[in-house]
Amino acid sequence: MTFKMTLAATAAAFVTLAAAGAQATVLYSGPASMAEMATGTSFDVGFDALHAGAANLSFVLDGYASLDGQNWYEDDFTLSLNGNALAKGTWNMGGGGADVVYFSPVGSTFDNISDNGADHLAINWNGGHVDAYVPLDLTSGHNTLTFAYDSLAYNDGQNAGWQGMGDEGWGAHNIVVTQNPLVLDQRGPGGVPEPATWGLMIVGFGGMGALLRRQRRQQPAFAAI
């Protein structure tokens, strides 16, 4: 292996080591369960970001009794980030109707694990759950997620309107927000790298220095003429 190839391999190993040190930090976690709410309600989750940029959200959406998908009694879920609607969909969790995601970020998944038939159209009044994963684009500092569920309004006979908690209740649990720290550009006040970053840099520079010393020892000696 040539010296350039060895140096490149060391640099790649250093980047890998830095990436391994970038363990995801949990910005928010909870609750394990929550009380049932009627449609037409919402709740907020607030947390502070490590930095502006990408993060991940996972949660379980709960449906009680006959929460509906896309049908006459449709109930819609909306997820907002800092006041802006981020994702919207409707799922059959006991009340029938089709599962539809109206919009969501690229890479999102919404898995209706309710036992409502292979096509998720059956009506069984047994409620259900949707496992959700949504990529986030956070702002620096404080962020707020809003979870909201609404029954479509009567709207001149186009939908049934609000049904009440005894018919269509909802909730959410296991809400987790994670974000990776900026390892390769993680600086504290005044542009000084954080201690963890210093450690990674020292390991990388030390490895490259050792290779340089080894290369010098392996160079052939030339006899004087």
Image: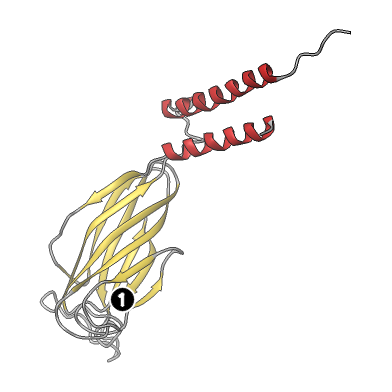
Residue 95 vertical position relative to residue 63 in the rendered view, above or below = below
Residue type beneath disc 1: Thr
Please state, as top left, top right, bottom left or bottom right, where the N terminus lies in the image.
top right
Q: Quadrant of residue 97?
A: bottom left
Residue at left 63%, top 18%?
A: 213
Residue sitting at the far top: 224
Q: Coloured how?
A: secondary structure
85 relative position to 13: left or right: left
Q: Residue at x 22, y 81 (%)?
A: 116
Instruction: Answer above or below: position of 150 versus 12.
Output: below
Expressed as whole percent of the image width and height from the top left, the position of residue 104 reads: 41, 67
- Say left or right for 215 vs 94: right
Q: Is residue 144 above or below residue 206?
A: below
- Which sits in the foreground, 196 or 154? 196
Q: Is residue 142 left or right of residue 208?
A: left
Give how far across and how far down residue 216 sits, in percent: 68, 18
Secondary structure state at the residue bearing disc 1? strand
Residue picked out by circle 1: 90
Q: Quick one: 90 or 127, which is closer to the camera? A: 127
